[in-house]
Image: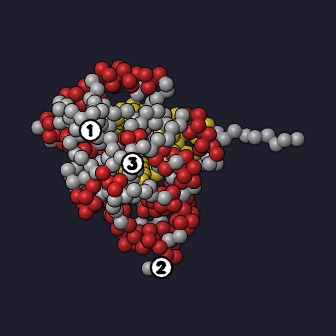
């Protein structure tokens, strides 16, 4: 099949196969991918809006026993800089965030076996009761599997208790690349691709919504990227539980993997990934561009390559900061960046309900 035939198939709404996807990823021109992705973006989300959420991403512990070689954030017990915060401390932090206008807290930590399962249940319950203006978007699949090991409960039982405490959505962290060939090299203690998919499947069965993520730019190939997208597309067919897909590039600073992969992935590669994911993930409503992980200008351009969401304001972020990669913004700048890219900015909730639309300011012509 030729590129032209594949593009025609996509344009008529027919799903492409993994083989066709791989051919497209390897051979299509970037601007052709972008044009096709943008067409699909407006087919799925017709309004000229780009959404964003006012959020923060604190961490309750950096102690972790998984030792991923792409991570500069984690510490072992007793190491300099290690910490674990009490539930009281985190609730106070959430209250301060709420006073600054934050509506969502994306909370993740290391996998710390010293924390009892009750810690997590209490954290969720107290968040929804004591800080009701904050929507908890807590715990990666790795943390949830860790909770199951510590508590002796099954993963569905852990998820059900967290649900009963008030948790209704979970982030997509821990996926990296859903290729076991790569996972064995970069995170051999974290489990398999099937483990990540299992947690997401069980969460969706209960009623959770979640994001799907992908970290690229390390040891993966184009084949691994297509495998990743195929696996989450299949699960979305099964459960419909994913709200959005969020790719970002590996940041090598201060990581063991830095010796092998010393450079960032290019902005061109990021735009290619954004466009290709919009085309391939035909059952995902939202694709998120990242001003944070890729830079503000690249994030703006990605809004013309198939993305319809600009992520969050991230008042606090520590994981990329540990890798010496820091970008900061605020609500006003986030709105301005979206306007500069040619879209109306729409503040949303975690689950993509629109709270407020900020239309592009009209500039009067000079006399």
The mark closer to the camera, 2 or 3, is 3
- From the viewer's side, name the closer residue of 37 and 263: 263
Please report whichever mark, 2 or 3, sits nearer to the chain's N-terminal start: 2
Q: Residue at x 37, y 33 (%)?
A: 58
- From the viewer's side, name the closer residue of 35 and 109: 109
**Which residue has dot 3 on it?**
253
Residue 330 in the image: above or below residue 305: above
Q: Is residue 66 visible?
A: yes
- Asked if the residue at tag 3 contacts the one at tag 1, i.e. Cβ–Cβ closer than 8 Å, the answer is no
Between the residue at mark 2 and the residue at mark 1, the CA separation in whole angstroms equals 50 Å
- Asked if the residue at tag 1 contacts the one at tag 2, i.e. Cβ–Cβ closer than 8 Å, the answer is no
Image x and y of residue 147, in percent: 19, 37
**Which residue has dot 2 on it?**
2
Crowding at label 1, few (<14), some or many (≥20) Cα neighbours within 10 Å? many
Q: Which mark is residue 361?
A: none
Is residue 342 shown left or right of residue 147? right
**Which residue has dot 1 on it?**
75
- From the viewer's side, name the closer residue of 273 and 258: 258
Between the residue at mark 2 and the residue at mark 3, the CA separation in whole angstroms equals 40 Å
Is residue 154 shown left or right of residue 23? left
Q: Residue at x 25, y 44 (%)?
A: 142
Please report whichever mark, 2 or 1, sits nearer to the chain's N-terminal start: 2
Image x and y of residue 145, in percent: 20, 43
Residue at disc 2, secondary structure = loop
């Amino acid at each position: 099949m030729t590129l032209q035939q594949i593009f025609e198939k996509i344009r008529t709404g027919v799903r492409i196969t993994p083989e066709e996807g791989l051919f497209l990823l390897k051979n299509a021109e970037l601007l052709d991918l972008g044009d096709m992705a943008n067409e699909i973006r407006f087919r799925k989300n017709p309004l000229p809006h780009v959404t964003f959420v006012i959020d923060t991403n604190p961490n309750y512990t950096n102690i972790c026993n998984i030792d991923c070689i792409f991570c500069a954030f984690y510490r072992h017990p007793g190491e300099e800089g290690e910490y674990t915060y009490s539930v009281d401390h985190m609730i106070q932090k959430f209250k301060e965030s709420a006073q600054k206008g934050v509506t969502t807290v994306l909370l993740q930590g290391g996998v710390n076996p010293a924390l009892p399962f009750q810690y997590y249940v209490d954290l969720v319950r107290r968040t929804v009761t004591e800080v009701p203006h904050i929507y908890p978007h807590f715990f990666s699949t790795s943390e949830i599997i860790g909770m199951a090991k510590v508590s002796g409960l099954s993963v569905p039982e852990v998820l059900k208790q967290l649900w009963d405490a008030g948790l209704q959505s979970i982030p997509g962290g821990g996926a990296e690349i859903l290729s076991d060939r790569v996972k064995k090299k970069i995170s051999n203690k974290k489990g398999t691709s099937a483990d990540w998919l299992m947690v997401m499947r069980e969460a969706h069965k209960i009623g959770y919504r979640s994001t799907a993520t992908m970290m690229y730019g390390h040891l993966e190939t184009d084949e691994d990227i297509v495998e990743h997208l195929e696996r989450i597309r299949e699960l979305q067919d099964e459960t419909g539980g994913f709200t959005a897909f969020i790719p970002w590039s590996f940041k090598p600073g201060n990581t063991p993997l830095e010796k092998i992969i010393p450079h960032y992935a290019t902005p061109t590669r990021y735009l290619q990934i954004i466009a290709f994911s919009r085309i391939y993930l035909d059952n995902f409503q939202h694709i998120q561009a990242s001003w944070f992980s890729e830079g503000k200008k690249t994030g703006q351009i990605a809004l013309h390559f198939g993305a319809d969401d600009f992520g969050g304001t991230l008042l606090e972020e520590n994981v990329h900061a540990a890798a010496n990669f820091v970008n900061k913004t605020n609500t006003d700048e986030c709105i301005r960046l979206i306007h500069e890219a040619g879209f109306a900015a729409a503040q949303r909730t975690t689950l993509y309900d629109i709270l407020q639309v900020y239309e592009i300011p009209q500039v009067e012509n000079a006399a």
